[in-house]
Image: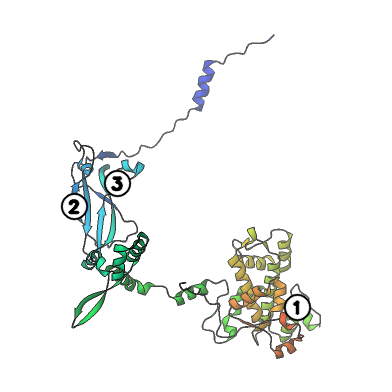
Amino acid sequence: MREKKRKRDDGEASERLQKRRTVTEEAPAEVVKVAWIPDEDEWAPIIAFTPGLSLPPNLSMKPYKKPRKSNTSSTGKPPIATSEHLLHNSAHPKMDYVGREEDGVGADALLNHYIGVYDPKLARLQLFRARKMTLRANLRPTLTDTEEETNTAKDLSARSALGLTFGTKKAQRAIQNLTKNAISPVKQGPSTQGQRHSVLDPVASAVVSSMAAAAPTVVTREDFQAAIDNSAPRPRHNPDAETPAEAYPIDQLVGRGTLRQMTVKEWQDKVSDGQEILTKSRFVSHRIQRIASDGDVRILKTLKYLLLLIEWNNILLPGSKGVGRKIPQGFQLQEKVDQWGSDLVDGVAERFAEGGRTLSRWQFDNLMTHICALCVTVDPENFMTDVYDIREDLKLENADVRKYFKAIGCRVVAPTEAERIRWGLGKGEVASHQVAKLRLPLEFPKMRTLPVKGRR
């Protein structure tokens, strides 16, 4: 047998409803009295808009009033709805400032504007209806312009006059277009002592006046070039350097703290015992024996820091959409941490990466230019290097490695005959080898200027 479902007791339902209800108590807020002041007076506050216009701070406007055009009766309407105001100022020698009420379009046609005045002592807010006006600047017409407009027909040549009178419609239209498009910014002024003077029209005069006022703040080509040099992705150079060694100091390229963390005792011991030192960099392996034999520990530490940057660059992965680079977070990074130490690896990431994870295009170029600056610095005698080895280490194209060396002010040229013999290069190998030389004054890439095309 099927059992009938027991109906829920009303008492239980009411208890559940009472449990769901929550009582929230709010702190009593201050009571503000709001009063609307009827616009019985014809002079009401004004809300002015100045689109694309910067008004003088001491500008005063003279008000004018006229009845508002309306198709409906004005009986019973407030003065703000039946009258229209206009603001005008003619103190400027060439400009007129005019403020007009502009009717809204569509839904804005029924939009009213109000101004509220709040009195904190009395806790009272008074609302006044305001007029919305738009202020604009107009160029004042002169007597010369008026005379020119009325005497346009007199300025036409005899042939143009005949064409307008007896020519075809096509010829008349062509003559009219020439007349409309004619521009004569320079007009002849009154003569003094038998000589006539050229006078600029108001438009040209206003433009020239504004150009003269803004001339001190115009950015020159030299300012643009200085801004580009300061924001370029390259190490900060010393503009007062007297020798190539002072152009890019090692303390700035590497850092004093990083130099103290670099240990080269193992390299020095192997060179003393006549052992060969092999690294993952062609550039470092071909120079480590000579630099370690010279006994300059500072240059040797700089070379090891260069090796750190090269190995760190080789584990970077392509960025999203092929832009920039990103740092791997797996075993590849851990391998470098175990080899070099977390302080050095993290220091490189903080210096050249954004948030220690990604490199933008600017940051990657900054890393490349630092590596190029270190390459010419580890040769303190000549401050020059063959770009072939570092190009192979960084896996760059020949044009890219030339661009990075030129970005730090180097001159990239073909090796001379003496350099070819000293480096043991065959004549067939000279084409793939180029020499980057750091010489003073540094020559940075200049801002390109596109040629101005003439009229055809």
Q: Nearer the viewer, mark 1 or mark 3?
A: 3
| Spatial separation of the CA atoms under disc 1 and disc 2 | 88 Å
Q: Do residues under tags 1 and 3 come within 8 Å of each other at their CB atoms?
A: no
Relative placement, left or right, of 254 versus 105 is right
- Residue, disc 1: 285
Q: x%, y% of residue 102?
A: 29, 49
Q: Do residues under tags 1 and 2 come within 8 Å of each other at their CB atoms?
A: no
Between 21 and 321, the one lying in front of the other is 321
Q: x%, y% of residue 180?
A: 33, 64
Q: Nearer the viewer, mark 1 or mark 2?
A: 2
- Residue, disc 2: 64
| Spatial separation of the CA atoms under disc 1 and disc 3 | 80 Å
Q: Earlier in the sequence, mark 1 or mark 2?
A: 2
- Residue, disc 3: 103
Q: Residue lying furthest bottom in this view? A: 418
Q: Which quadrant of the view contains residue 157?
A: bottom left
